[in-house]
Image: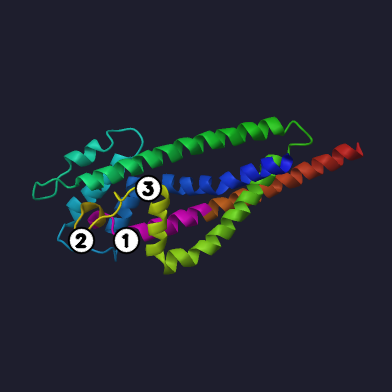
Amino acid sequence: MNGVAVAAIAVVVTPLFVVDGFRVLAGDWFVRHELGRDGFPPDRYGLSDAPRLRLALTGLHSIQPGGEGIALLRRAKLPDGSAAFNARELRHMQDVRDLLGTAFRAQIAVVLALVVAGIALGRSDRWRRVVPLGLLIGSLATLVVAVLLVPVIVLGFDGFLLRFHEIFFSGDSWQFSDRDTLLRIYPEVFWQDTAKLAAGIAVGQAIVVALVSSWWLRRLRRRAVVKAAA
């Protein structure tokens, strides 16, 4: 039974790290940095920097939990006064908002469950190693997954992005033409940078949690030795 509990904890660790990465990147600072950095591709259809940034921030705000949601996109206009986002784009962004909200809520619930489990199981000689061992295994698995995904993200990003959308979104609302606003404000390079940074954040968390959980396990072993010798 201990092994099942350890495995259950280990399995949720990588998703927790990934969602954390998206929490960090789902802020105005990242959109401003990306669209304002040197080398970011200009809009091929002539959308200038200021309205492009405004629409990109509007898109971000529409998927963040709380707030007005997709209504922001319905009101958004291009510089010529036409609607910035079509029906397909609105449907997709609603799907993204729903997915992100679910992921954020699930992450909080899992973290709270881990904290409660760590406290409760820490009182039992038999179970106290379950949480730190699960965290350690999950963190090491995250590092392995990151190593395996780096070539995919760097060399085959189109395929990676396609599989991601096929897994997390039903239908074809995520398929757009080059003239659709979403592709103009968030070109592929934006998502490449997002994936790389999210992976980097996950790796950083994995290293820290692996070190902390290793220390936790060593501390428990020392306590067990002292207790046995007493």
Number of the front mark, 1 or 2? 1
Magenta stretch, main secondary structure, is helix
Q: Is residue 186 magenta?
A: yes
Distance between the alpha carbons at the discs numbered 3 and 1: 18 Å
At x 52%, y 45%, the residue is 16
At x 51%, y 52%, the residue is 202
* Residue position for label 2: 43
Q: Which residue is more in the foreground, 146 or 152?
A: 152
Q: Is label 2 in a helix, a strand or a loop?
A: loop
Which mark identifies residue 188? Answer: 1
Instruction: Using residue 37 as the reference point, say whether residue 178 is left or right of it.
Output: left
Whether residue 18 is visible: yes
Residue 181 lies, in percent from the top left, at: 21, 53
User: Mark 3–mark 2 contact, CB under 8 Å?
Assistant: no
Q: How many marks?
A: 3
Residue 179 lies, in percent from the top left, at: 19, 58
Identify the mark nearer the N-term, 3 or 1: 3
Label 2 sits on what residue type?
Asp
At x 25%, y 52%, the residue is 182
Label 3 sits on what residue type?
Phe
Which mark identifies residue 169? Answer: 3
The residue most toward the right is 229
Residue 99 lies, in percent from the top left, at: 39, 41
The residue most toward the front is 171
Magenta range: 184-202
Label 2 neighbour load within 10 Å: few <14, some 14-19, many 20+: some
Relative height, residue 112 to residue 55 (above, below):
above
User: Mark 1–mark 2 contact, CB under 8 Å?
Assistant: no
